[in-house]
Image (cartoon, grey):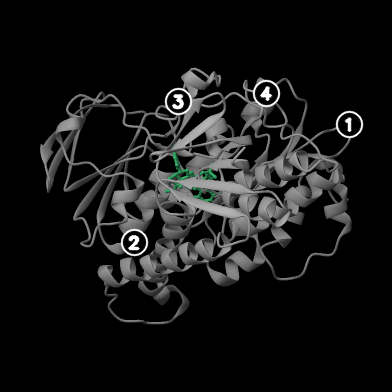
Amino acid sequence: MDFSVIIIGSGQAGVPLAARLAAAGRTVLLAERGDVGGTCVNAGCTPTKTMVASARAAHVARTSARLGVHAGAVKIDFPAIVRRKDQIVQRWRDGVGRRLQANGLTLARGHARFAGDGRVQVGGEVHEAEKVIVNVGTRPVVPAIDGLADVPFLNNRTVMALHQLPEHLLIIGGGYIGCEFGQMFRRFGAQVTIVQSGAHLLSREDPEISASLEEVFRREGIVLHLGANALRVSGREGAIAVQLDTAATVRGSHLLVATGRRPNTDDLGCGEAGIELDAKGFIVADDEYRTSVRGVYAVGDVLGGPQFTHTSWDDHRLLFDILTGRPHRGRHGRFVPYTVFTDPQVAAVGLNERTAREQGVRFESATMQFGVVARAIETDETAGVMKVLIDPSTERVLGAAIVGAEAGELIHVFVALMQAGAPARAIVDAQFVHPTFAEGVQSLVMKIPRFALR
Ligand SMILES: Cc1cc2nc3c(=O)[nH]c(=O)nc-3n(C[C@H](O)[C@H](O)[C@H](O)COP(=O)(O)OP(=O)(O)OC[C@H]3O[C@@H](n4cnc5c(N)ncnc54)[C@H](O)[C@@H]3O)c2cc1C
């Protein structure tokens, strides 16, 4: 064998796995065909949240008069925003590069594919290892919309490479990627129109959660076409038209397509290697990341489960324990929180009302407007709503969703409680600092009649 382990893809699981396995004495080959660090560092979390920060600064400056502060005219230096984003991405990429310069770790640049018998070809060379770990991630879906192939459309990667602000950005897709880019570009000064096939933005959330964000988007001047499918796209750079099945036609200067992600397995040689894929091309693996081929494991987005950086990173943690014979647990049954980095943020964990009903899970719930929280009033960050579901027999939290300022931080109150298996009553019994947004979490739980003060 050439190596103990071959890892394909330097994503959020591949990099820490490679570094830690090498530190544990394994010889590791890490194959990467693009920039090290994967989607999160290069085209996902890092660049988007860096640009979202600029967009928020513009919004705060533009609306500061509501707090009695007159900041003057706001000027957007879009090239400077993009430069700052590029510098921060480069800093993370360099950090990943340094982490990969470890004893026992070989970085092979190039496209990797299975060459049969557990061997892996990278560029022109074929390598063998006892174990192969697949961390190849996903790329944007290109939907089958008539005419789309003939117009210059953008995806999450290319939209952040623009150096000039679009005059009017059309977005097909009202999921988290479409929403984050939509609000960001609106706050930079572009006109923005979002076309969403579902009845609401973020269609997996309960309707009142989505509606709360829609209200903010509309107030900021984002045009929403909900329950609308794109039938046909036409035009050229600077003048693009999207014909909808609602009889409307929307027109803009640029088109961003954000309709989901597909796995990078079509060019991986999975068929020849005998690795089972599901109908959408995601790798089928058991609770301990084993694929249908002995010695081959898969981690991260390519499993088709919740596609988040923290989930992929947690996959690395669990698989490392499995591979090194430590006490371990499987990947199923984890609580997976997430945050949409709009403003206000949308954060959730566990079941919502729709999924609880679908699964026949009994629950008690409470909903509370974010705007009643003292801190929200004081800071004038009143948009949003909070919702929690508990199990009536154990009083444990089944799930929660928060639309509000710093929702991505607040949701961790529930994450920690759920992970500890503690009852929601613990929130009632705790002292929450006044005046914080987190106080609202306590007030929310106390709205469930059994926890109400009488
Ligand atoms: C716009 C956007 C914003 C996002 N924001 C967030 C966020 O805020 N928070 C969050 O948690 N998640 C976010 N995500 C999702 C997050 O980026 C992914 O869940 C995360 O990167 C985990 O992916 P991964 O480890 O499975 O693989 P990836 O990070 O996708 O890495 C896979 C790597 O494999 C390489 N590769 C693929 N095929 C081959 C091959 N055959 N040979 C060699 N190399 C190969 C690729 O080049 C890539 O580097 C965002 C995603 C996008 C697109």
Question: Spatial distance from mark 3 to mark 4, Cα to Cα?
Answer: 41 Å
Q: Identify the image quadrant of residue 226.
A: top left
Residue under pointer 4: 357
Which quarter of the figure is the N terminus placed in? top right
Nearer the observer, 179 or 150: 150
Query: Residue at (77%, 69%) from the top-left corner?
Result: 433
- Please report whichever mark, 3 or 2, sits nearer to the chain's N-terminal start: 2
Q: Position of residue 312 (x, y in %)?
A: 60, 44
Indicate if the residue with disc 1 has its beta carbon within 8 Å of ligand 1: no
Are the two marked residues, 3 and 2, in contact with CB atoms closer than 8 angstroms? no
Residue under pointer 1: 393
Q: Give the foreground label among 3 and 2.
A: 3
Crowd band around label 1 with a 10 angstrom C-alpha radius: few (<14), some (14–19), many (20+): few
- Give the numbered dot on residue 385: none
Residue under pointer 2: 187
Q: Amino acid at mark 1?
A: Ser
Query: Residue at (29%, 75%) from the top-left corner?
Result: 74
- Please report whichever mark, 1 or 4, sits nearer to the chain's N-terminal start: 4
Q: Amino acid at mark 3?
A: Gly
Nearer the observer, 396 or 78: 78
Q: Position of residue 67 (x, y in %)?
A: 47, 76
In the drawing, does residue 38 fall left or right of residue 240?
right
Vertical order, 89 against 31 (above or below): below
Indicate if the residue with disc 3 has its beta carbon within 8 Å of ligand 1: no
Query: Is residue 201 at all visible to an observer of this figure?
Result: no
Considering every residue shown, the one lying at the far front of the view is 1
Mark 2 secondary-structure assignment: helix
Residue under pointer 3: 269
Are the two marked residues, 4 and 2, in contact with CB atoms closer than 8 angstroms? no
